[in-house]
Image (cartoon, rainbow, N blue to C red):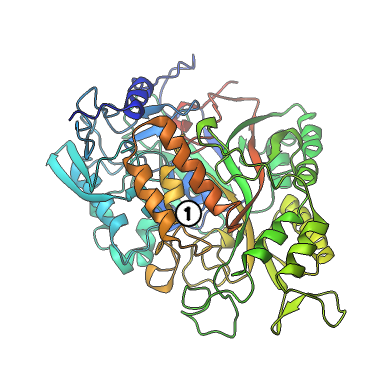
Amino acid sequence: MKLKTALLGAAASLALAPMAYADGHEGERGRDGELKIIYWQAPSILNPYLSGGTKEIEAASLVIEPLGRYDETGALIPYLAEEIPTVGNGGVSEDLTQITWKLKEGLVWSDGTPVTSADVKFTADYCMNPEGGCAQGAKFDGVTDVSVVDDLTVTVTFDKPTPNPYGPFMGGQSPIIQAAQFADCLGAKAPECTDANFMPIGTGPFVVTEFRTNDVWTGVANENFREAGKPAFASLTFKGGGDATASGRAVLETGEFDYAWNLQLAPDVIASMAEAGVGTPVSAFGTLVERLEMNLTNPSPDLAEGVRSTVAEPHPFLSDIAVRTALSMAIDRPLLVEVGYGQAGRPTCNLVPGPAIYASDNDGCLTQDIEGAKAMLEAAGWVDSNGDGIREKDGVELRILYQTSTNAVRQDFQALIKEWWSEIGVETELRNIDASVFFGGDPGSPDTFQKFYADVEMYANNFDGTDPQAYLAAYRCGNEPKPDSQWQGENINRFCDPAYDAMIDELAQTADLDRRGEIARAMNDMLTKDSMTIVPLVDRGRVSAHANTLGGVILNTWDSELWNVADWYRTE
């Protein structure tokens, strides 16, 4: 039976020819001198397979690239691949169990050696190694085999019909790494390969010349880049650290840098900076959600390492859905938006806020209900028996360690949420951690968001493209960070429900777009309103800024924000 699907039909219409951006500034590669980019969250590594942090994924995208990307509209476009495979062009099998990618001819790594299908296969082997703790493992969900057909062709085989086969090798979260460079870095050895992880050999527009973890890295134009005359810049300085305010000023007021990422600042602050006339803020909505993650395991420091924050020990009070629900009910989301984001934010109850077909009609959390939260805790047996303002039950008090990265908006959110939680009888200790450490993924650090040595933590992330399948698959049982996965893994709150796993499998096999929407919305609801394991707060518009002298910038919320740096140029 031929399984021609609506999903792959849509993909075919979105699979565009390779994009060329006519900038009117054609010339020699490196003609425009230095490009200076600033991220107030500094990358700690340039290997997105060992960190789920956005800062690592985006910084690495300047160096290593996927077979295909998503453009600013969410359309699939080829990068290292000749075209996007579909059923229509023969790249996806009629039974939807295989996708075959063909590399462009003549591609070389920055060291001058050929890019081959063996590199693509190696990338899959690297991420799928069970001892490696790949941070992007959900991209390979359902993959049973990746085989080399010839030097330019590779076939990915799935364990069942897969209407959305664009997980592996698509987008900035799943780039191709060089087999020769990473050959001795498989499995548990992956974090030990410092040279490869800090200075990967790539196909992207820049080559790393020096990397200082959690600080700055520098690069030069890739002389082997596949497009003549690109990049326009001869060198790159990628500065990390500091705070969003300093980053914004460096582009919008002083002109010290050309591009500043993720200006998580109050809207009036950004507007004031822009009045200097040196730079321009740019913004767009995508799938970026600021949320609270509830730790379903026990983070107590009294527990042995390897037991702490693992499924071996459930959380003493967040295992109670009444507590999680009450914590959510106490939050005034519209006020958070007003304080933190203005027009660049929308209150939300959804982990997946869009596209519309995947966005649940879930608005029950939008109205704060302090009295309802108190009543819920009371009914569940959580009472303040000694009058100290803190509820307890069976000797367990509601005392929360609430952590996030260091950022003015996030600290404002923490202060407000702490006050609301105190009103319902919950004591909260606030902790903020430098973003370079918090999102760094160092398996030896106690302060990473993956290790989750706290009760509640707050952050935001999003997914490549417009389909949330791989994003939602992250919450599969067993995908939690743990010692034997080098504390990598995407199931941050240690959620596990066989019914949810069954929906992951059903979504992976479902072709009809309407039905895919139904399943994804049900999965979203299971994680949020049904279990309150994830407590969404704000659907965040991405706000960044570029110098007025920097041309070619197209803000993209569906892939790496730096997706088209090869097309950037100096206007004057």
Look at 55% across and 37% down and name the residue there. 359
Q: With respect to residue 243, does 105 lie above or below? A: above
Q: With respect to residue 523, does 560 lie above or below? A: above
Q: With respect to residue 548, does 122 lie above or below? A: below
Q: Nearer the viewer, residue 226 or 307?
A: 307
Residue 498 is drawn in which quadrant?
bottom left
Query: What residue is pinned by disc 1?
Result: 52
Q: Position of residue 246 (x, y in %)?
A: 72, 46
Outermost front residue: 379
Q: Position of residue 540 (x, y in %)?
A: 65, 40
Q: Would residue 433 be seen by someone viewing this image from the given angle?
A: no
Q: Nearer the viewer, residue 103 or 431?
A: 431
- In the rendered image, the quadrant that contains the C terminus is top right
Outermost left residue: 150
Look at 19% across and 26% down and name the residue there. 90
Look at 75% across and 26% down and name the residue there. 277
For the residue marked with disc 1, what is the amino acid?
Gly
Side of 118 relative to 547 (left or right): left
